[in-house]
Image (cartoon, rainbow, N blue to C red):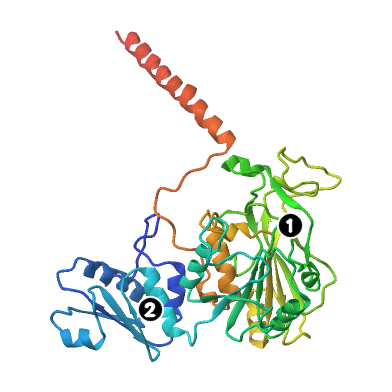
Amino acid sequence: RHPIRLDLTESKRYSISDQSQKIVESLKDDINIKGFYQEADPNREQTRDLLETYRYYSKKINYQFTDPDRDPSLAKHYQIRTYGTLVLEGFGKTQTIPTADEETITNAILKLTQEQQRTVYFLAGHGERDISNVDKDGYSTARAAIEKENFQVKTLNLLVDPKIPDDAALVVVADPQKPLLTTELDALRQYSIRNGSVMFLLEPFSDGGVAGFLKAYGITISPDIIVDTMSRVFGASYLIPVITEYGFHKITDGFNVACFFPTTRSIGSAAGIPDSIELLELAFTSSYSWAETGFRLGQTEPPKFDENKDRKGPISVAVIAAISAANPGNDPKSQEQPGGKSAEATDAGGQAYLLVFGDSDFASNSYFNLQGNADFFLNAINFLGQQENLISIQRPKTAGAPLTLSRSQNRLLFWVGLLLMPAVVVASGLAVFQLRRKHR
């Protein structure tokens, strides 16, 4: 009846997110949804509107509502205990969810379509970030967000068992305080040969003994820390650089939100790498930044740019390597970019990825939900975990986001309000006064 829909609200409250659209549009079989609501329940119509939005993007979505009080046998069959429960059936499986919101429904659909739930392993045993720690430096918020993307999240200690499990979607090495042993690095190397992907989140002045391992893949770690004077505009420290530029990749496709990387180091790409490896610098600091080499821990005075030692921004702080492990004879230079269209074809033949960030704080509890940090991190997790249909910008927040002005904009606003607007009022009054005097 209404084939064209257009949502003009700022927060897109009458649409489903890009992630949900991609998932339902890719459905190969029907999904039947049963909603158990009382007929007089006002939430029933809200849920109907939401499900109708899903159906707008895919006719594979079918739904019906049942009042459990009028059809108790059906409610008993599906073990319905509370009003407002949804039951999703498809692909020979069933998912029951207690609430009808987009995030829950999309995750349930995804669970129906996936053959198995894969696991994201966080390396442990070297003082890495703790995925159970709820303090500011912990990764409990990141863990919860990854689990919402339909992954299991576990820790992995290669000192106990040097083999990475077969159900691993990827391995995350987050800020190791002690060097990894040779046997552990060998395990990561063997995992990449099996087309496994690894994400490293490092910090300045500490590399966890992985510098040599990464250099073999053409990824370089520099002994520096990024200073960014632009951060002061946002009220942040000069050691919290703003990430404003991104390389072309599926992880950053359509991504134009600023990220903040507290205390980050530069990550670069080397020349002369094997043909089986393709490198892409993924994220860059602003042109107001530089890579400081003379900074000391505990230093209180602001560092100054030294053109003889320091490198002027933009500075790369994240690099991804696409490794044609199963088919090393492939020439990666013939591919578009790691993660580009031609890289998809290589994935079918076997491809591993190494993604290295020069910062680990941006994914910590303190900074995870700051600006685009969560989106960037989860996009990377989904790509490396080969769950690319979830990669997109997260749902826009509701109105009320702060408007940050630069110094020049603040000055302009001040003088316009203090001088220009009053001057316009006075001039208008004088003009009216002169006109009236002339016509007397």
* SS label for mark 2: loop
Q: Badge 2: how crowded within 10 Å, few (<14), some, or many (20+)?
A: some
Mark seen at residue 192: none
Which residue occupies 53% across, 54% down?
Answer: 371
Q: Is residue 169 above or below residue 138?
A: below
Q: Is residue 31 at least partly visible in the picture?
A: no
Which residue occupies 57% across, 38% down?
Answer: 406
User: Relative to the observer, which residue lies in front, 10 or 175?
Assistant: 175
Q: Is residue 154 above or below residue 6?
A: below
Left or right: residue 279 versus residue 401 is right
Q: In which quarter of the image is the C terminus?
A: top left
Q: Do the residues labelled 1 and 2 touch (CB within 8 Å)?
A: no
* SS label for mark 1: loop
The amino acid beneath tag 2 is Ser
Question: Which residue position is annotated with label 2?
Answer: 58
Please state which of the two labelled residues, at mark 1 or mark 2, is closer to the viewer: 1
Q: Tell me which corner region of the image, top left, top right, bottom left or bottom right, holds residue 157.
A: bottom right
Q: In this view, does 319 lie above or below 429?
A: below
**Number of labelled discs?**
2
Q: How far apart are marks 1 and 2 (CA)?
A: 44 Å
Q: Where is residue 97 in the image (x, y as percent from the top left)?
A: 33, 76
Question: Which residue position is annotated with label 1?
Answer: 266
Q: Tell me which corner region of the image, top left, top right, bottom left or bottom right, holds residue 124.
A: bottom right
Q: In which quarter of the image is the N terminus?
A: bottom left
Which residue occupies 84% across, 47% down?
Answer: 309
Q: Position of residue 136 (x, y in %)?
A: 54, 55
Q: Which residue lies furthest to the left in this view?
A: 70
- The earlier-in-sequence mark between 1 and 2 is 2
Left or right: residue 253 versus residue 225 is left
Q: Where is residue 70 in the image (x, y as percent from the top left)?
A: 13, 81
The amino acid beneath tag 1 is Ser
Q: Where is residue 351 in the image (x, y as percent from the top left)?
A: 68, 82
